[in-house]
Amino acid sequence: MSRHSEPEALDSRRQTLRSVLTHGFLVIVSFVVIYPVLWVVKMALTPNELAGLSPSPIPEKVTLSNFEVVLSTTDNAGHWLFGEQLLNSVIVSGLTTVLGIVLACTAAYAFSRFNFPLRKAGLMGFLVTQMFPGVVMAIPLYLLLGYLGLLDALVGLVLVYSVSALPFCVWMLKGYFDTIPKELEEAAVVDGASRMAIFLKIILPLAKPAIAVTALFSFMTAWNEFILAATFMNDERAYTLPVALKQYVGAQSVDYGYFAAGAIIVSIPIMALFFVLQKHLVGGLTAGSVKG
Amino acid sequence: MNSRHLLIWLACLGLLALAPALESTALAEEILLWHAYRGDEKQAIEQVVHDYETLTGNTVRVLAVPDEGYTNKLVTAIPRGNGPDVFIAAHDQTGSWSENKIISPLGSDDLPEALLDDFHPQTVEALRYKGDLYGLPVAFKSSVLFYNKKLVSQPPKDTVELMAMVEALTNPEAQKYGLVYEITNLYFHSTWLHGFGGHIFDPDTGAIDLGTEENAASFEFARRLSVFLPHDVDGARISKLFNDGDAAMVINGPWFMAQLGEDLDYGVAVLPFVTESRQWAAPFLTAEGLFLSSEAHNRKASLELLTYIACEGALTRATLGKQMVAYLPTYEPGVLNDSPAAAERRAVFLAQLDHVVPTSNRPEMSSVWAPTQQALRKALYGAPSGATPYWMLVIIALLAVGVVFMLKAHDVRTGLRRPSFMLIGLLVCASAIPVIWHLFTIHSDDTAVDPLTTLREAQTRIEVVQAPAAIQANPAPFVALFGLVMLILAGLAYRAYQKNKKRGVEYTDTKVAAFYVAPATIGMFTLVIAPFLVGTALSLFSYERGEFIFVGLQNFARLFSGEGTPLTDSLSFYFTLVVTILWTGLNVFLHVTIGLTLALILREPWLKLRGFFRVLLIIPWAIPNYITALIWRGMFDYEFGAINGILKNIGLTPVAWFDDFITSFSANLITNTWLGFPFMMVVTLGALQAIPRDLEDAAAVDGASAWQRFRFITMPLLKPALMPAVVLGSVWTFNMFNIIYLVSQGNPDSSTEILISEAYKWAFERQYQYGYAAAYAIIVFFILVVYSRMTSRILEADA
Amino acid sequence: MAGLTLRGIIKRYVDAPSDTLKGIDLDILDGEFLVLVGPSGCGKSTLLRIIAGLESITTGTLSIGDREVNKLHPKDRDIAMVFQSYALYPHMSVRRNMSFGLEVRKTPKAEIDKLVDEAAKLLGLETQLDKLPKALSGGQRQRVAMGRAIVRRPKVFLFDEPLSNLDAALRTQMRVEMRRLHRALATTTVYVTHDQIEAMTLADRIAVLDQGILQQVGTPMTLFHAPANRFVAGFIGSPAMNFLEAKVLSKGGQFSLELDPKSSLVVASSVIERAGLEANDTVILGLRPQDLNLGVGTVHGLVDVVETLGWESHVHMKVAGENFLAAVETAQAHDLRPGSAIQLELPTAAVHLFDPKTGVALAHGREPSDDDGSKGADE
């Protein structure tokens, strides 16, 4: 992309005009995009009694008290609730990511490379599950997890989450695997590598960008979900952060300051991951090509 | 599969099987208590339970369950044996729980009859259903009048005084209000409804009876008040206004005190006498009860705990938890040593008890709220036209067809020009103009509607929402049909297999492949497909009195009949379907257009700060979508939201976003567009990378303009890469529950509900009509399958 | 070290209109350099992949040495393969690319290092070992691919058009290196190419494949001088052989071939007899462009285009209404202009006769002698 000859021999004035207009447009769009974020930051930093809001995204008075309250949430027995809920979220999201990657990579590899009965039907089946409306599944899932004794258990959430992000991840990874030249595998076969060795040593290292994106999506699914978590978990100490956060905007009272502070805390890890992985996002999503 | 692989998977499965065993530590002996308290009340109940444990040596496990979905959780958990033995909840679900066998009545063997005399009779009455008592009252809550002593020296005694004071103290420009309360919320409006002699259920027949003159008079009164009240306020805003001294009076419940500042000088008063009807204003009474679960393991111990909390625990709850307890001995002189101010307030709450009406605990009550509130809203602010979505769909369809014709006027493949197509396209687009005009004219006349009419409508809608009597159907034909379908499928699969075998297809990798796909497939089957099939099966049942009754296709018949309402009624399936199509179509169109535009800009090599802009524009994707939804909900707030703030700053009138279909729908649309375009942008950026720049350069050398390059080179090459993402995006948008549920919440009048959120409402907010909700979901599924099949057909035909 | 035996190899793909390989019988000798050549789509790559074990055999048997390997996994066949795209593992260093095969076979570390260093030295890659493939030039990548094959010391080398991605100069150079390498290692080699120059220069023997059928197997010179049929004749040799339809005339015991009423040439009767032809038979006459003399002769042509390549020139002309090419010294073609008439002398010894219907070779002007095709200079 670095090389690009400007095809239209534009005179420099038109070129400048175009550049100014485009940059201006981008700045406006960016501001619209970023405005709600600034608004949340402002709410989080504004002392609770001051939140009679003007549209300006700059806080008039800054305090960290909202963050302090949210971060130091403790229950009556003295358990540091925020800490435990954070730990729950980290455990659930971490395990979901690992399990999600394992399941998605193996399945996507099979769909990309093997010839077996029902291959097409299976792949279609994976995609069709994306069309299942979640509402009908909540109750049967609840029954199932209850039967397995996994209610109020983080493992139950991990299982449900890792499977729910699966169809999209498989679809994306399969697309990426398809672009890895078959000859690389054949070379490895001739070299004497087993299927497993090829999968682990050739395919997976080459699919790193797509796997990174898969990891991001699995992690996000688990980190952001609150409906199922709120349904399956009863004990406050077993909550994940989104469920805890949702409580700040309950039906009777809304603590926007706390909610905003909590929202920022919850969003930061995801944002950080996004920024680290955003380069891969472009290639990973649309099956970039591997150049030897 | 070789043995080593097998071992690996077995080990993994073993680990998973062990995990639950490690986590479940529940002891059989302990009593499980659930409550939804937070703060002081939570601390108090834990203290009481602790005292009980020390006294008796029994163990009690207390679980503070979040208020959100508390009742749903009880209804789901108790029948499956995962619920509590004893729980504390508001009384209004007593009827529904009794019918669904969630709770167990307290017989005369369980409690000494005399014990009940120690509780306020209204609160005991609230816990009775069909003659049986289902719990002991813990505390009561009802609205009173809060007033700021600096602004109001003497609280109003009657409605005439109230009206005069409100008028005098209100100055909307300065954001000063005489009275603030959630005026369209039936819970608070009940004050006037009963005050004007109205009712919800006919006291003689017990039937819903909304269309009365008295109810209408209360609506009329609210309309007079509404002129002076801020729009669309919620609990948090009210406490903010009152704390800041911007609201002189507030109608609210005892929980409001917890949100008021220490140094705020306020008083509480009994709600005023209604001069017009010569009756006292009477708000709803909510009694919090201690209920005994029908699945309680140790009935005797549970009862003991229940009684202890209600009686002996009352003092702790009143002092530590600041509760208005229902146990009357607590209020005997000398028992409580409140501060004078606190004692005064307590006295007012007790005095208000003489003028309250317990919220009905009948199951039908849960269907009353939404329609009645919508009726009230219409009476105050006017009615949206139910035809709007249909007209919008017509406009969009016309424009889309017109644009397609115009694009086909110059064929990409052959370069063939068809001027007639261009003309047709323009005409079709132009024909949308009168429709747009019509849409505007039907919109300009939304003035307030006559209260009696809206009440009668509400009555009809409540009746519609009730589940029709389930008629047991014979499952035999369905079982046979299911068997037949399975047989046909198996036959088809076998035939395909034979055909492939004949053709000489070799499945050399079957065994290895099985090893690779097995884990994901097993996971999908158990955690996605099986629950879905169970959900599907539910659509053939009706959930009534805690039991599933097989009703065959009745749910579908009801759905396709559109509830017997006109197409313009938002409860009609067809109305929701049209809204869903509009929702999906517009969202996907905006996602693609914005995503594509930005991607095309972002790849220009001369762009400064390219990486910076790209990262910035991805941000909405990185924020969890429920947070996004709640942020935007706040931004669209009438009084305090940033959007109206901007509108005011540039001299426009603020918009009540959630009062009207178009604005409410737009609020949803804006939110979802904001969070959805980065995905399309990133996909497009990726797809653009695969198009050699040479092609566009070649076109430029050939003399093609920027538009021509886009239209004839970039777009056709982009299409195949973009289409899967568009299909997937449509599917996601079609089922985008969070945004609707959290932003517009279906307002106004359930009209912005899409199929999936409507299904949710049927399942959880309209008397647990699971079967009917499942029927909705099945239809959603079929629509999506047909849609994606059609798009892939079109794609294949194109390729 | 081992030879290869192919017996009746048939390959059928699902839904393909006809078999890709229609019964291949071929013996490849131990240590031999066999080039499989043919136009694209002739099945040569499929045959190579069958030998490698990357494709299954529909019917027939394949043996390496004395062992039938039909069902044997590629890794157990003790072969090494160089792919057209090289198939270097992009995420591994040159060293690891070369050692990967040894690694997965659990060769001891010390031995791996020794073997890789040896191979690197042989190929001149000593300084490149720690680079990633993307940092290498095309020729270097090609060498790495060869290195990956030779470190394993397999029984058989398989090459799938390994030079087709290189530019002309590098290709010539690599051809020489290949030959040198084979001399050094003397491993049985099967080499697939569509380039007949590679085939001629590299092969001990060439197998020509067309439409799934083996057309001819033989030394390069056999194929050049005595092609078995019109396809082989046209495919081997550059520029390609000219073909003209001719009629056999007999005039007093002397045979001549008439191209058109103006042009004919006299052919030794022994050739006609060997071909089993009689007067008035139609036959396809094949003539290599190099075997012609311009100047005085019995065949008339009309010059179309003259291409000067330097020492040599190609004269494109029309003979008996057909396109005809002569490759002559530039000096001879010096004053030819488009449109000028010309006479050609066609030596009898250079004549090839083919059956007009089947394309089978009927006779060659010069019969092959035993010493033809030996690579005297090379051995």
Image (tube, coloured by chain):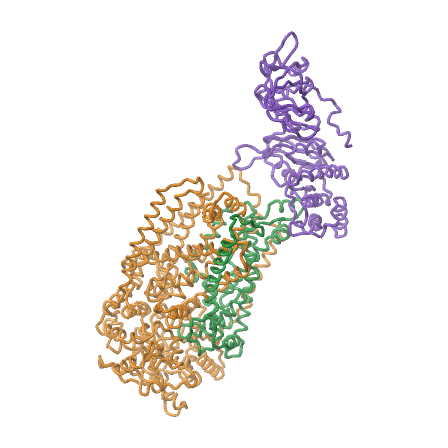
Chain colours: A green, B orange, C purple
* Up-down relation of residue B657 to residue B678 (above or below): below
Q: Residue at x 52, y 48 (%)?
A: A9
Quadrant of the rendered image containing residue B507: top right
**Residue lying furthest top:** C252
**Residue lying furthest bottom:** B334
Left or right of C105? Residue B183 is: left
Q: Could you say which is closer to the camera, residue C116 or residue B650?
A: B650
Q: Could you say which is closer to the camera, residue B445 or residue B114?
A: B445
Percent coordinates x, y for residue A212 in the rendering: 57, 58
Percent coordinates x, y for residue A108 in the rendering: 54, 51
* Up-down relation of residue B150 to residue C150 (above or below): below
Percent coordinates x, y for residue B619 in the rendering: 50, 63
Left or right of C286? Residue A236 is: left
- Residue B98 seen in this snapshot: yes
Q: How many marks?
A: 0
Percent coordinates x, y for residue C104 in the rendering: 69, 50
Quadrant of the rendered image containing residue C253: top right
Left or right of B49? Residue A114 is: right
Q: Could you say which is closer to the camera, residue C132 or residue B520?
A: C132
Quadrant of the rendered image containing residue C34: top right
